[in-house]
Image (cartoon, rainbow, N blue to C red):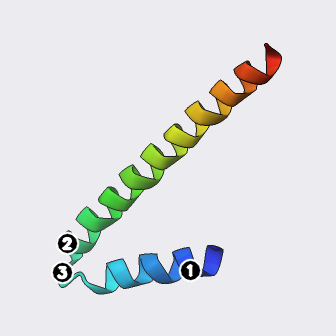
Amino acid sequence: MYEETKIWIYEEFAKCKSIKELEERYKELQNFIKDEYEDCMRFLKEENENERR
């Protein structure tokens, strides 16, 4: 999975034609990763709560 993700990120960055565009894409990817992390964390916390019951 790590290698696939690395390739995907590289491909996304390779599409950029300027430094500004690269910086914007970097921020978008950071936000995407943060959102996915938060969704997973919420899910795991809910699962954990359900197991306690």
Q: Residues within 10 Å of mark 2 (few under 14, many from 20)?
A: few
Residue at which label 3 appears: 18
Examine the rendered structure and indicate whether residue 42 appears above or below residue 5: above
Viewer-nearest residue: 9 or 47: 47
Along the horizontal axis of the image, is 53 left or right of 40?
right
The amino acid on which the numbered mark 3 sits, given as a three-letter code, is Ser
Do labels 2 and 1 touch, CB within 8 Å?
no
Q: Residues within 10 Å of mark 3 (few under 14, many from 20)?
A: few
How much space separates mark 2 and mark 1, taking CA atoms? 23 Å
Residue at which label 2 appears: 21
The amino acid on which the numbered mark 1 sits, given as a three-letter code, is Glu
Q: Position of residue 5 (x, y in %)?
A: 53, 74
Quadrant of residue 48 within the rendered picture: top right
Do labels 2 and 3 touch, CB within 8 Å?
yes
Examine the rendered structure and indicate whether residue 7 appears above or below residue 20: below
Residue at which label 1 appears: 4
Q: Nearer the viewer, mark 3 or mark 1?
A: 1
Q: Position of residue 12 (x, y in %)?
A: 34, 78
Question: Which element type, helix, strand or loop, lies under badge 1?
Answer: helix
Q: Residue furthest right?
A: 52
How much space separates mark 3 and mark 1, taking CA atoms? 24 Å
> Which image quarter is the C terminus in?
top right
Which residue does the image show at 39% across and 53% down from the upper left? 32
Quadrant of residue 22 within the rendered picture: bottom left
